[in-house]
Image (cartoon, rainbow, N blue to C red):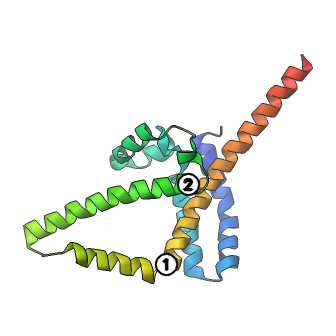
Amino acid sequence: MPSGKSHDRITLWLLPGVLTGAFMLTIDVPLTIIVSISFLIGGFMMGPDLDIQSIQYRRWGPVRWIWSPYQMMVKHRSPWSHGPVIGTLVRVVYLGIWIGLFMVLGVLAVNHFWQAQLSWSMLETTLMSLFARYGKQWLALLAGLELGALSHYTSDWLASMIKKKKRKRRHQKK
C-alpha cells in the first residue's frame, strides 16, 4: 500500500483535476471551492486510514482520541472504512455523532451558566433550515469528501494489483 506521504502527494496531484471537474459540472465557483476544500479534507484528515494509527489520525492532534472507538469498531480495510461511499458515510456519521454530543454539552453549558434558554426544538429548526437551505453545498461537501477517500481507495487497489502481478511473474519464472 502507498504510505501516508504517498497518499498526500496523490491528493495534491489530483487537486487540479478535481477543481476543473467540479467547475465544469457546477459552473459555480463557491461550489467548486467547497468540493475542492472538502476533497483536501477527505484526503488529509477524513480518509479511510482513520481506522489505524495513521498520519490522518495524527493530524487530528489533541482531539484524535475521538477516533479511538472508531478504530476499535472498524477493522482496517473493511468495507466500513475503505468501501466507496459507505466508508465516507460511516466516517461522516461517526464524526456527526461526536459533533452532536459536543453541541448538546455546549447547549447545556450555555443554558446553565448564562441562562440562555436555548431549546432543543429551536436548535432542531435551525439545523433543519440549514440543511434545507444549503442542500447543494452539503452535497458538494460530501462529494469532495468522497473524492478524497476515493483517491485513497483507488491508489490502495492499484498498489495491491501491481504487487500481485509482480508476485505472479516471480512465481512463473521459477
- Secondary structure beneath disc 1? helix
Query: In the image, what residue occupies the spot 24% across and 76% down?
Result: 121
- Residue at figure coordinates x 39%, y 79% from the top left: 130
| Residue underneath mark 2 | 86
Residue type (three-letter) at the residue carrying disc 2: Ile
Q: Amino acid at mark 1?
A: Gly
| Mark 2 vs 1, N-terminal side | 2
Q: Is residue 75 above or below residue 117?
A: above
Disc sitting over residue 135 in the figure: 1
The quadrant in which the N terminus is found is: top right
**SS for dot 2:** helix
Crowding at dot 2, Cα within 10 Å, few <14 / some 14-19 / many 20+, comes out as: some
Q: Nearer the viewer, residue 134 or 45?
A: 134
Q: Position of residue 170 (x, y in %)?
A: 85, 23
- The quadrant the C terminus occupies is top right
> How many numbered circles are shown?
2
- The answer to whether 65 appears left or right of 93 in the picture is left
Relative to 96, 35 lies left or right: right
Q: Residue at x 34, y 49 (%)?
A: 63
Image height check: is 138 above or below 89? below
Residue 21 x, y percent position in the rendering: 70, 71
